[in-house]
Amino acid sequence: MKLVEIEPGRWRIDRREVPVARSSLPCPSVISDTMPPTEQVNGKFYTSKREFRAVGRALGLTEVGTEQVKPKTRSSGDRAVKEGRRKALQAATEKYRAGHRPKG
């Protein structure tokens, strides 16, 4: 919003919002396939990301940031461990409600 003088001594607030341009490009969300010439381990230079990645995959290389991470498994996945933890928490809660407070 800005203050606009519409005639001498008369002012108005211009409440029209100006749309914000994200980019001067026609499709700002499209990622280009071109890149500066980059050398792959086979000694050739590539200007296409697709070709560069295809050669890397064919040679068994892992591109940093695209590797598949193995899901983590919990070490306490055993049912008996979970049940023991649940019983210990229940016993501690009952003691606390009964008025027992640890000294410390």
Image (cartoon, rainbow, N blue to C red):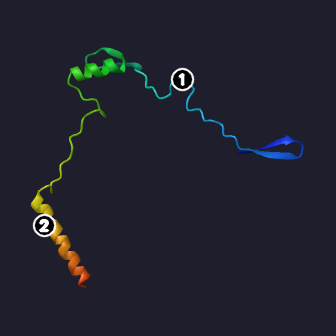
Q: Is residue 21 above or below residue 89?
A: above
Circle 2 packing at 10 Å, graded few (<14), some (14-19), many (20+), is few
Helix, strand or loop under label 1: loop
The C terminus sits in image quarter = bottom left
Residue 49, image quadrant: top left
The N terminus sits in image quarter = top right
Q: Is residue 10 left or right of residue 35?
A: right
Determine the residue positioned at 20% across, 47% down: 72
Direction top: furthest residue: 44
Circle 1 packing at 10 Å, graded few (<14), some (14-19), many (20+), is few
User: Of label 2 and label 1, which has the lower sequence position?
Assistant: 1
The residue lying toward the viewer, choosing from 16 and 31, is: 16
Dot label at residue 85: none
- What amino acid is found at the position of numbered circle 2 in the picture? Gly
Image x and y of residue 42, in percent? 25, 17
Direction bottom: furthest residue: 99
Residue 82, image quadrant: bottom left
Image x and y of residue 56, in percent? 26, 22
Determine the residue positioned at 57% across, 26% down: 24
Image x and y of residue 21, in percent? 59, 32
Q: Is residue 20 above or below residue 60?
A: below
Helix, strand or loop under label 2: helix
Residue 19 in sight from this viewpoint:
yes
Determine the residue positioned at 24% across, 23% down: 57
Residue 39 in sight from this viewpoint:
no
Determine the residue positioned at 20% across, 24% down: 60
Q: Is residue 57 above or below residue 21?
A: above
The residue lying toward the viewer, choosing from 23 and 48, is: 23
For label 1, the residue is 26
For label 2, the residue is 84
- What amino acid is found at the position of numbered circle 1 in the picture? Pro
